[in-house]
Amino acid sequence: MKFAAIALAAAVGALAPAAALGAEGKPTPGYWEVTNTTTVLISSKKTERRCLVASEINKFLTGPSNRHYACTYPSRSVGGGKIALKGSCTTKKGQVADVSAQGSYSPTTFKLNATLSTKIGGIPLSGVNTTAARRLGDSCPAEALGSDEARSALGGGDTPQQ
């Protein structure tokens, strides 16, 4: 159960900033508020405000993963304000969860609805995650510089390149 909830949050949570690519019509780098709501037997909701820089955004779009899970999305469509992904995430111990997600984006918003399915001890388990994000502005307060990559890319400044 814990893997399913964490894998879904990791896979989908990473996708929220993925849309902030900065191309015409797509969300742009800057200061963002991201809310993830996950339900796998129980529900949890987490909201964070963070600074998103172009290099992080490009990584998320080409292959959202994290240090705990390796995710691949052989089916990926991003364009015209819509996003659709289908793939899987695998833990270091080999536990696999299938992930399917659809959503929409604009220069200042992003929404993604995802489903996850896996088996834990032979028992099928599924869950859902909704990621809703909104851009708060161009410059990022110090407390929003959550990643080393963001701090490095900004070089002591507070406004990511568009």
Image (spheres, rainbow, N blue to C red):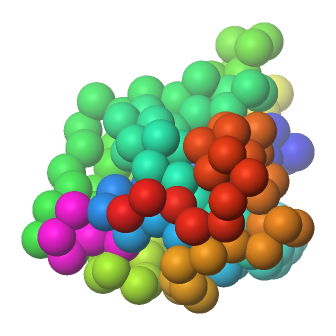
The residue at the point 74 percent across, 26 percent down is: 67
Look at the picture and state if 160 lies above or below 25: above
Of the pair 129 and 104, the residue shown nearer to us: 104
**Residue 140, percent across and down?**
69, 72
Describe residue 141's horizontal placement relative to residue 53 as left or right: right
Query: Is any atom of residue 7 visible in this view?
Result: no
Q: Is residue 60 magenta?
A: no
Quarter holding residue 124: top right
Q: Residue at x 28, y 30 (%)?
A: 74
The range drawn in magenta is 23-27
| Residue at the far front in the pictured view | 156
Q: In which quarter of the image is residue 2?
A: top right
- Residue 82 percent coordinates (x, y): 22, 70
Please indicate whether residue 149 sits to the left or right of residue 113 in the image. Answer: right
- Residue at the (74%, 52%) spot, across then down: 156
Percent x, y of residue 61: 38, 45
Would you place residue 130 above or below residue 63 in this image?
below
